[in-house]
Image: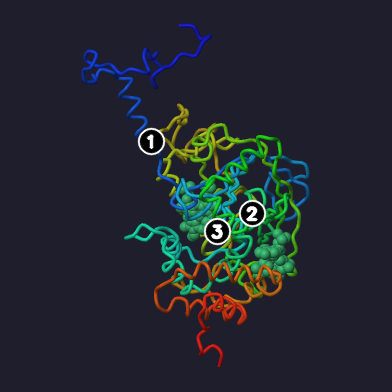
Amino acid sequence: MSNEKKYLTTASGAPVGDNQNSITAGQRGPTLIQDVHLLEKLAHFNRERVPERVVHAKGAGAHGYFEVTNDVSKYTKADFLSEVGKQTPMFIRFSTVAGELGSADTVRDPRGFAVKFYTDEGNYDLVGNNTPVFFIRDAIKFPDFIHTQKRNPQTHLKDKNAVWDFWSLSPESLHQITWLHSDRGIPATLRHTNGYGSHTFKWVNKDGEEFYVKYHFKTDQGIKNLDPKVADELAGTNPDYHTEDLFNAIEEGNYPSWTLKVQIMPKEEAKDYRYDPFDVTKVWPHADYPLIEVGKMVLNKNPENYFAEVEQAAFSPAHFVPGIEASPDKMLQGRLFSYSDAHRYRIGANHESLPINRPVSPVNNYQRDGFMSHDSNGGSAINYEPNSYDEAPKETPENKTTPFEVEGFADSVPYDSDDHYSQPRALFRDVMDDGERDRLMQNFADHMSAVTREGIIERQLENFYHVAPELAEGVAKKLGVEVPAHLKK
Ligand code: NDP
Ligand code: HEM
C-alpha cells in the first residue's frame, strides 16, 4: 500500500475500511461483534482518562529553556548551573490546587509552579508554588488539610466550615492565608506571578561545602492581579482564561520569562538562625539573606499534545541531581515519598520512560519490566548487581548523598517555635499599603461570611488578633461581629 496518502488503521496497524458505518446484520439489523474496529474504538475510548491528580488537577504546561546568567558554582556543583551562558531545556506546569480537571482558572488558590530541568545529569524537578510559604509544616497534616479544600463528603459542595475550622485550629496557616487573601491570591495571568521553591533545599559545592537555599522565580512581566469580581465573572464566562492566555502568548511569540534568584544560608548559620530555616510557613527575610541572581527561564514552545505532555508530566521533589539535596524540612521529607507514589498509581510504574519524563541523559539501572514497559527494557543487558561485567553500569561514590548529622530521640515532636504571627504581621503592616490591607480584610470577611458552625469565626479572629489587633478588628467589622471580649482586656 502506498505511503503517499495517510490511511486510517486500527491500533495494530491494519487498514480500516469503514470508519462511519458499523457492520450490522442487514440494513436495520443489530451490530455484529465481528466489527473488531468498532469494538477497539469503543474500548479504547473508555480508557482515555487516567486519574486526575489528587491535587493540582487543572493545569497548563509549556516548554522552554533555562540559561545561567550568574556564576553560583561556589555554592553548588550542579552541572546545569556550572557556567554562565549554559542552557538547559525545561518544561513547566502551572496549576490551581483544589479544583478538578475542568475547574475554573481564576479562583483564589495558590498556583502550582512545577519546573522540570532536563539536565545532563538527569532530571531536576523543582515542584513549587507561586507563594513562598505553605499552610502547614508537617506532611502528616496534608491529607486532612486537602480534604477541607475539596468537597464535603455528603453534599459534594465546597465547604467553608471545613476550611475555616481547619485553618482556625492550625494557626501555622496564618502566613499563607494572609498571602492568599491578598491581591496576589488571584494572578491576572500565569505570566504575571512569581514562583518559589518554598522549601529549603541543600546545595553542595565541589569541595563538599554545604549551603541551604531558597528559590525565587521573579516574573519579568511584573506582578499583575485580578479584581475578585472580575475573576468571578471570568470563572463563569471563560473558565480556561489562564490556560488560554499562556497558550496564546507563546503562540504569538510573546515568550514569558522569569529571573531565578536564590537566598543562600551557609550551613553553620542554620543552627542559630532566628527562625527555624526548615519551617515552610516561614520566609527568610531579605535583610538576612539577600537575593542572588542565578539565571533566566524562558517559555517558548507550547505542548504539541496536552495529554502526552501536560497530563502525563510527572514532577517529583525527589528528582535531584548531584549538588542539590533535601533538607530536613518535615513537609519536604513527606513529599519525597508522595509524588512518585502518586505517579505510579496515576500513570504507572514505567512513567519515567514516557517522552515528557524521560531524561536527556542516559538511564542505566537494573530495574526491569512492569506494566507498559515500552522502550527496550534494558535489552539483553544483565539485570542484577553485584556482577562481574565491566560494561554493566556502576555506582559513582562521588555522587553519594552528603552525610549529615542527626540528634535527639526519635519521637513525634512538634516544631519548637509557635511564632505563627511575626511574619504575617510583617506582610500586613510593612509590605501592604492601606488599600491592600483593606482589600485583604474584605477578602477574608467575604470568604468567612459563609461559615455557620459555632466557634470558628471567634477562633479565627483570635488568631488574627495575635497577628495584629487592627487586622482582627477590621475583619470583625466587615463581618458585622465583635472581636471576642477577652482579647481586649
Ligand atoms: P522585604 O520588604 O525585603 O520583602 C518583601 C517581599 O514581599 C518582596 O519579596 C516582595 O516581592 C513581596 N511582596 C510585595 N508585595 C506583596 C504582597 N502584596 N503580597 C505578598 N508579597 C508581596 O521584606 P522581608 O523579606 O523582611 O519579608 C517581609 C514579608 O514579606 C514576609 O513576612 C513575607 O510575608 C513577605 N515576603 C517575603 C519574601 C521573602 O522571601 N523574604 C518573599 C515574598 C514575600 P516582589 O519583589 O515580588 O514584589
Ligand atoms: C501535586 C502531594 C505539598 C506543590 C501534588 C500531588 C501530590 C501532592 C500527591 C499530585 C502529583 C501527581 O499526581 O502528579 C503533596 C504532599 C504535600 C504537598 C503530600 C505535603 C506534605 C506541596 C507544597 C507545594 C506543592 C508545599 C509547593 C511548595 C505541588 C505542585 C503540584 C503538586 C506544584 C502539581 C505538580 C504538577 O504540575 O504535576 N502534591 N503536596 N505541594 N504539588 Fe504537592
Q: Position of residue 477 (x, y in %)?
A: 56, 78
Name the residue that disc number 1 marks.
Answer: 371
**What residue is shown at x 40% (from left), y 78% (from top)?**
454
Query: Which is more N-terminal, label 2 or label 1?
Result: 2
Q: Residue at (55%, 69%) from the top-left corner? A: 444
Residue 428: quarter of image = bottom right
Quadrant where the N terminus is found in the figure: top left
The x, y position of residue 49, in whole percent, is 40, 38
Left or right: 132 as drawn, with respect to 33: right
Disc 3 is placed on an element classified as loop
Q: Nearer the viewer, residue 225 or 397?
A: 225
State left or right for residue 286 relative to residue 103: right
- The disc placed on residue 131 is none
**Viewer-nearest residue: 359 or 242:** 242
Please say if 87 is above or below 380.
Answer: below
Which one is in front, 441 or 291? 441
Dot 3 corresponds to which residue?
108
Tell which circle, 2 or 3, labels the residue nearer the N-terminal end: 3
Are the residues tagged 2 and 3 within 8 Å (C-beta)?
A: no
Q: Is residue 339 visible?
A: no
Q: Residues within 10 Å of mark 3 (few under 14, many from 20)?
A: many
Residue that protrudes farthest toward the top in the picture: 1
**Disc 1 or disc 3, which is closer to the eye?**
3
Amino acid of disc 1: Phe
Image point 71% across, 73% down: which residue?
430
Residue 111 vertical placement versus 20 (above, below): below
Q: Amino acid at mark 2?
A: Gly
| Disc 1 + disc 3, Cβ < 8 Å | no
Q: Which numbered disc, 1 or 2, marks the residue closer to the eye?
A: 2
Q: Which residue is mark 2?
A: 195
